[in-house]
Amino acid sequence: MNPLLVQFLSEARDTLYDIGQKLMQLEQTPDNADLMNELFRPVHTLKGNSGLFDFPEMTRVLHAGEDLMVAVRDGRVVYSREIADCLLDAMDFVGQLCDEIEQGITEVSHIDDAVRLADALRKLIAVNAARTDRVESLDNIGVPEQPKPTNFIKSKNLFSLAPVPETIRMDAFRRILKGDPLHRLVYSPVEDCFFQGDDPLHQAQQTPDVLWCAIVARESWPNLVDLDAYRCVLVFNLLTAAPSEELVELYRYVPDQVVIQPVDPLHLVIPTGDPNGGPVYEDFVAEALLHLDGGNLASLGRAARTMLELSNPDLWLSSALRWLLLLLENMPSNRAVLRTLIESLRTLTPPDWSLTDHDAAEPATEGLSENVTDSLNSLSEEDAFERDVILDAQRQILMLQDQPAWHSGRLKAVATTLINCCAAMGEIQTAAEIEAALKTGLETGSGGLLLDWLNARIGMPTLRANLSEIVQSPQGQQQTGNVISAFTDEGPKFGRRAEDQIGPRSLKVDQVKIDLLMNLIGEMVVSKNALPYLAQRAENQFGAREVAREIKAQYTVINRIVEEMQGAIMQVRMMPVSFVFQRFPRLVRDISRKLGKEVNLVLEGEETEADKNIIESLADPLIHIVRNSLDHGLETPEIRQSCGKSAAGTLIIRAKQEADRVLIEIIDDGKGIDPEVIKRKAYEKGIIDETTLEQISDRDSVNLVFGAGFSTAETVSDLSGRGVGMDVVRTGVERVNGAIQLESEVGKGTHIRISLPLSMAVTKVMIIESDGQIFGVPMDHVVETVRIRRRAIHTIKQSKTTVLRGRIVALKALNVLLEIPAEPRVNDDELAVLVVRVGSEPVGLIVDDFHETVDVIQKPLEGVLSGLSVYSGSALMGDGSVLMVLNMKEMV
Amino acid sequence: MPIDYKKNQVLFREIVGVEEAEGLLEFLHKRPAAKIDFGGCTHLHPANLQVLMAAKIRIAVWPKDANMCFWLKSALQPEK
C-alpha cells in the first residue's frame, strides 16, 4: 500500500469520528449554523481526499452527503433525525470501505450500496426542498432573490497574458471567436492547505481544457534555510477554455481561493519579440493606415504579408504583423482595433486595448494621472484596488518578523515604493513624512514607524482578507468604502504570520515503535540494576572500595535518567479515555432508539489518561455495561413517568484519576437491581448453594451478576441475556489488574465502579525467599511482613492460624502451596510471615525470608509455561537471574 | 522510497507525497547543484514543488507523462 493511501486511511478514520460526533451534536441543536459549517468541512475534506484515489463509491456517497449538508446549511432543508440517520449510515459505509481497503479486499463491489445511499441522501434534499419551497413561496413573495456569491470579476485583469506563448494566444483567440468560453483562473490555495490534506496541484490538474498555466509563488522565495515547505505560497494562473459553470463546479469547495475571469479576445493580442533597435517602421505604418482609411483591407493584408516575409520571425514587428493578419481575417470590420495595432508599431509598445472604442465602457487603467489630484477616496475602483494591493504588500513586508542583513535595504525599498505611490496620487507633501519615518527606522533598525504610518494611512490591517470580498461583490465600490470604515477601529494583527508557521505538529507513530522503546527501556532498567551488584563485587571480592563508591555514584545518575526516560515513554503510551468514550454517544443513541427509551448520556473526565493497553482493555467491558444499563437498567419513558421520574433516563460515564489508578464509574438512574431476584436466579443456576442463599448480604448478592453463566433476562435478545456479559466484564477488568464493584438501589439506579492501574508496564514486587529460591509478590497484594513466634501459631482443624492485631489470620506455607518438599526455615523460634490480601480476607504466607522490593518489567509466561497459572509472569533481575512472580489470586 | 538521492542527482519515482518535502529541502540545501530526474514521476505533491521552485534547481529529465510534464514545466520552466 502506498504511503499516501495509508495516510488517507488513518486520516479518514479520524475524520469519520469527527463527523459522527458533530452529527450527534447537531441533533441537539439543529439550528446551530456554526456546527453545520464545522460538519461540512470534514466531509468536504474527506471527499476531496478520497478523490485522490480510485474509490468512486466512497466519493459518490460523500458527494451526496455533502450536497445534503449544503442544502441544510443554506436552509433549504431542515435538519431532522432521518437526515442524521441517513448521514450516519453513509459515514458507516465509508468506514466499512476504509476497512476493506486496508485489508486489501477489492473484489467486493459496493456500487449498488453506494448508489442506494447516495439516492437516499439526494431524495432527502428533494423531499425537504419541495416542502420548504412551498413555505417560502408563500412567505417570500416580492422579496428579491439573494444575489448568489460568485467569484467572477470582469473589470480587473487578473494576470498579464504577455508571458503566454504567441501560438497559444492565437489559438485561444480563434477559439473565442468560434464561441468557446475562455477564462483566466487564479487559484491561490490557503497557506495551511497542506495540513488540511489538500493537494492544490492535483486540484489544478483537474481543470478541464487548460491552454496555458503558470505556477508562481505568492511572495519571493526565501533562502532555503528559511523555507517552510509546508506553508503553501503557490498561486496557479490558468488559461482555460472550459465553461465557467464547469470551473465553478470544480472549485466549489474552495470558492474563496479562486477567481475566474472571462478573457476579452483583444487582451490576447499582445505582440512580443525583439524590438531590433527600436521603432523604424513609419513608412509601413503610414501605408497601412492609408489602406485602412481607404477601406482597402486586401491591400493592407498584402502589405502586411510582404513585410512579414521580409522580416525575421522573432521580431516584435513580425509578431504584430501576424496578429494584424489574424485580426484582418477574423474581425475586419473593427477598424479601431486594426488602427490601434498598426499604430503600436510606431512605439513598439503593446496596444492598450482598454483605450479603444471597442471597450469604451471599461474605465482606463492608465488613468491614474487624471484622478490623482483628489483624495484617495476619489480613485476609481480598479485604481483603489491597485493601490490597496501595493500598500498591503508594503505592510506585509514591514510586518516580516525576521531581521536579515539587508533589513535597511528593505526599509528603503518600502519607503521608495510608498513615496512613488503617493507621488502618483499627487500627494507629494507626504514624501517628507515617509522620509522622516524611514530615517528613524534606519537608525533604530525597525520598520515600526513606517508601519504605523502605513496603518494610519490605510487604516485597514485586514485588507488582504477582504480583497476577495471586494472582488466578488458586484457593488465593489460601495463595499470598499464599507470595509474601510468597518476596520479602521481595529488594531493591526501583528505576528499572525509568525503564528502560522509555529502551529503545533504532532507525530503519528506506529505503536510497534513505542512498544520497542518500552522493551528497550525495560532492558535498560534491568541492566541498570546490575550496577549495584557490580559495586558489591568490587568491594567484597576485589576490595576496591573507592571503585565501588564511584560505581554507586554513577548508578544514581543513570538511575535518575532511566527513571525519567521511563516516565517519558509511559507518557507517550498514555491515551485519554475519550478513545473509548467516543463511541458511546453513537452506541447509546442507536440502542436507545431501538429500545424506544430516552437517554441523556453524560460523559465526564474524558481527558483522564492511562496506558494504551489499559484503555483498550476497557473498551469491551464498558460496552457490555452500557448495553446492560440501557437494556435492563433504564426503563421506558412511560414506566419512568409512572414512577415519578423524568421521561428521559440519565446515564453518566465518568473517569477520574485517583493516585495511581483510574476510576471509571457508570451510573444510571434506572430501576436498579433487586438483590432478591439475583439471589434466586443465582441459586437456580447453581452459582450459589442454599447456605449462601440464606447468608449472603444484599451488597454481595448484587455482585453475583459478575458470576459466569448469570443472566436475569427471561429472553435472549440481541442486546443481552446470553449470560456471558458481566462475566466477560469481570475477567476483562481483572486481566489488567483492575477491580470492579457494583452497587444498586432498587428504583434508584445502579452504580458500577471500575478501578484500573494507570500503567501495567512496571510492577513493584517484593522478593521473598523459600527453600533457597526467590519469588516475587506484587506489592499491590502485600499488607505487611511480620515474624511470628511458633507459639503464637494455632492449629484449627487442619489449618494453621494466628492472631494479628485482634484478628484471626489463616496461615499457609508457601512451600506447601508450591509443593516444595521442605519445611519453612525457623529463625530464633520465629517464622517469617508475609501477610497478603486477596479479595477481602488477609492471608499469611509462611516464607523463609524477605528481601527488598524492586521495580520489574513483568513478562507473561509463554509456551508450555503459560499453563502455570500459579505464576503471573517472570522478570529479569539485575544480576541476570530470573524472578518468578507469584499470582496471588490463583495461589491463595 | 519515492525519492532516490544520488550524489548529484535526485530521482523522483511514481507518487511523491507530501512527507518527502522536508527531506528534499534538506538535501537541496546541502547540494544546491543537484539535478532533478523526473523520469518515473507520476505525481508530485505541491509541497515538493515549492521546494524545487525555491531552490531554482536544474532539471535533467522531465516526466514521461505528458500531462505531468506540462504542469511541472509551468512551474519550473518560466517562459523566457
Image (spheres, coloured by chain):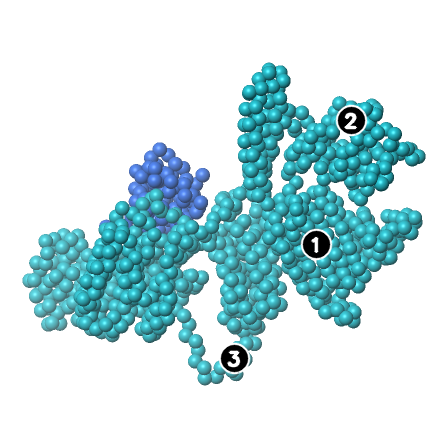
Residue at point 64% right, 24% down?
A879
* Residue B56 x, y percent position in the rendering: 30, 45
Distance, label 1 to label 3, CA atoms, is: 50 Å
Decide: few, some or many residues near mark 2? Use Cα within 10 Å; few <14, some 14-19, many ≥20.
many
Whether labels 1 and 2 belong to a single chain: the reply is yes
Q: Disc 3 on helix, strand or loop?
A: helix
- Of all chains in the rendering, the one displayed in cyan is A
| Chain assignment, label 2 | A
Q: Are marks 1 and 3 in contact (CB under 8 Å)?
A: no
Return the residue nearer the eye: A432 or A289.
A432
Can residue A843 be seen?
Answer: yes
> For the residue marked with disc 2, what is the amino acid?
Asp
The quadrant where residue A284 appears? bottom left
Q: Earlier in the sequence, mark 1 or mark 3?
A: 3
* Residue A202 x, y percent position in the rendering: 41, 53
Residue at point 10% right, 64% down?
A285
Residue at point 16% right, 65% down?
A341
Q: Are marks 3 and 2 in contact (CB under 8 Å)?
A: no
Q: Disc 1 on helix, strand or loop?
A: strand
* Residue A39 x, y percent position in the rendering: 53, 62
Drawn side of residue A724 relative to residue A481, left or right: right
The quadrant where residue A432 appears? bottom left
Return the residue nearer the eye: A28 or A54.
A28
Closer mark to the observer between disc 1 and disc 2: 2
Q: Earlier in the sequence, mark 1 or mark 2?
A: 1
Return the residue nearer the eye: A743 or A190.
A743
* Residue A396 x, y percent position in the rendering: 32, 57
| Chain assignment, label 1 | A
Can residue A242 be seen?
Answer: no
Q: Are marks 1 and 2 in contact (CB under 8 Å)?
A: no
Residue annotated with mark 3: A136
